[in-house]
Every structure is written in C-alpha cells, then in structure tokens.
Amino acid sequence: MPELLQLMIAPFVASMVLVAMLSYLGVHIIARGVIFVDLALAQMAALGATFGLLFHVSTDSPLSYAFALGFTTLGALVFAITREGGEKRRVPQEAIIGIVYIVATAAALLVADRTPAGGEAIKNVLVGSLLWVTWPVIGRMALVYAAVGVLQWLLRKRFLTISLDEPEAESRGWNMRWWDFVFYLLFGVIITLAVPLAGILLVFTLLVVPAVIAFHFTRSTARLIAISWGVGALASAAGLGVSFRYDLPTGPLMVCMFGLVLVVALTVRRVWPDASPAGK
C-alpha cells in the first residue's frame, strides 16, 4: 500500500493543478455558452504538435509546445474575430467552434499520415499520460499556470463581466473582440500544457463537468468557483484511487468518475429543490 501511495502522489498533484485552473475557466465557458471551445483549441494544439513531427520535432520538446501554442493562438484569433453579440449574432458561435474542431481534426489526421509517429501522437492526445507524469513536468506546469492565474486575477472583473453579464460589458464600450482574444489566448496556454498530460477527453471533462454541477446549485460567482474546485478535486481523487486499485486506464476511468459524480449531483439537485440556482 505505501508503494501504491507513492505512485499516486505525482498524478494526484498534477490533477489538482489541472483542477485549480480548468475548473475555474469552466465557469467562464459555461456562462459564455461556448461549451466545446476547449475541444477546438485542444485539437488546434494537437494539430500544431503533429505538424511539428513533419520537422522531426519531438512531441515533448519545447519546440513542440511552441508549434502547439502557435496553432492555438490562431484558433483564439478566429474565435475572437468571429464573435458577434446580441442582435448582430447570425449564427451561434458554437457553429464556428465546431467547424474549427472538425477542420483541425481532419488536418491533424492528414499530417499524421505523413509521419511515422503520427498515429501514436494522435492516440496520446486523446488519453494523455497523467499516470507517468514527472515532478519536473508538474513544476513547469504549475509555474506557467500560476503566471496565467495572476493575469486572470488582474483581469477578473473584465473577464467575469463579459462571461456573466455581456450586456453590461457592451454598455461600457469595451472592445469585446480584443478581450475575447486575450481570454482565449490565456485559455489556449492552459490547454496547450494540459492536453499532452491529461488528454483531450479528461481536459474537456475537467473543464465542463464541475462547472455544470456548480451552475445547478448557485449563481454566486464565489460559490460557482468553490463548488467547481471541490467537485474537481473529489472526482479526480476518486478516479485516481479506483484506477490504481483495479489497474484500469487512468484517463478514461477519471472521465467516467466525473460522469458518475454528475449523475449524483443532478439527483441531489432534484430531491433538494431548495438549492435554488438563483441563490446568492
């Protein structure tokens, strides 16, 4: 058992670092109604890393991350430019996000077909390598996430107003497309580092499921964030524990655990109607 606990420490710490940032960002994503933006940006990051293979760039090298971030930045620019609010909105932005995701996926498959390690790279993007994470990787990720977290904190009023009260943001005359680009760019940095470690499936789950649960119980910003963090930490710890105990694939098992926690939370919400979403 002690040996098992030692093996679990690094993946658990890594998952907590991911939860700390992704659960918070998930509140913004759910409020903005751009649920699949993380999948699209993650796929753009995967396309960048796969494209780097054409130039014999190792997928775990700094240059590979640079390729991934470059393509993610392009995705952030597309989402910012195509933003339309209020009565000007002709089509839901989710349509643009879906198109970017599909095109990036198809392009990644085409590029992977031309590289010997392309197929394995695509597989790793889906499931990640959380189980084998090392402390240096966790340290680098934590430093970058801390820097992004500071920027998110400094810009929190703008980001939260745009996410939770778009009419108010527009009435103040803010350049919405510019601030969307900044938000998605910071979001892209987080995704670029998260996907190789946790995989697209788990990253999407960490981003969306805790926030969905939180929005079923409150509309208070502080409580939304607190519930998201709590749910993310609980489900991640449970998923890792079951994965190690029964020797099951970590990423898929954690995704299923989050699904189970969601079902339990929705059941509690139904039998506890006093937990009003409008509560402060």
Image (cartoon, rainbow, N blue to C red):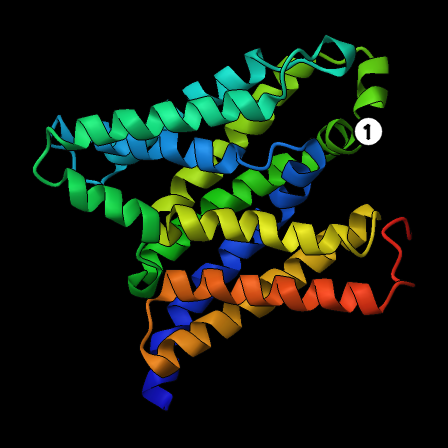
Instruction: Please identify the residue farthest to the left as the structure is shown.
Output: 116
State the SS at label 1: loop
Q: Between residues 57 and 151, which one lies in front from this camera angle?
A: 57
Q: Amino acid at mark 1?
A: Asp
In the image, is 252 to the left or to the right of 188? Answer: left
Residue shown at 80% from the left, 57% from the top: 217
Q: Residues within 10 Å of mark 1 (few under 14, many from 20)?
A: some
Residue shown at 57% from the left, 17% from the top: 80
Mark 1 sits on what residue?
165
In the image, is 264 to the left or to the right of 77? Answer: right
In the image, is 270 to the left or to the right of 193? Answer: right
Q: Between residues 98 and 179, which one lies in front from this camera angle?
A: 98
Instruction: Please identify the residue farthest to the bottom as the structure is shown.
Output: 1
Residue shown at 49% from the left, 16% from the top: 78
Q: Is residue 240 above or below residue 194?
A: below
Across and down, in percent, residue 194 comes to 42, 46
**Count of numbered circles on the image:** 1
Q: Between residues 279 and 145, which one lies in front from this camera angle?
A: 279
Quadrant of image for the N terminus: bottom left
Q: Between residues 97 and 61, which one lies in front from this camera angle?
A: 97
Residue shown at 69% from the left, 13% from the top: 89
Across and down, in percent, residue 119 comes to 17, 42
Q: For residue 2, what is the image quadrant?
A: bottom left
- Regarding residue 67, the answer to whether it shows in the image is no
Across and down, in percent, residue 92 comes to 63, 21
Across and down, in percent, residue 132 comes to 28, 63
- Regarding residue 140, the answer to whether it shows in the image is yes
Q: Is residue 272 above or below residue 109?
A: below
In the image, is 66 to the left or to the right of 30? Answer: left
Q: For residue 73, what is the image quadrant?
A: top left
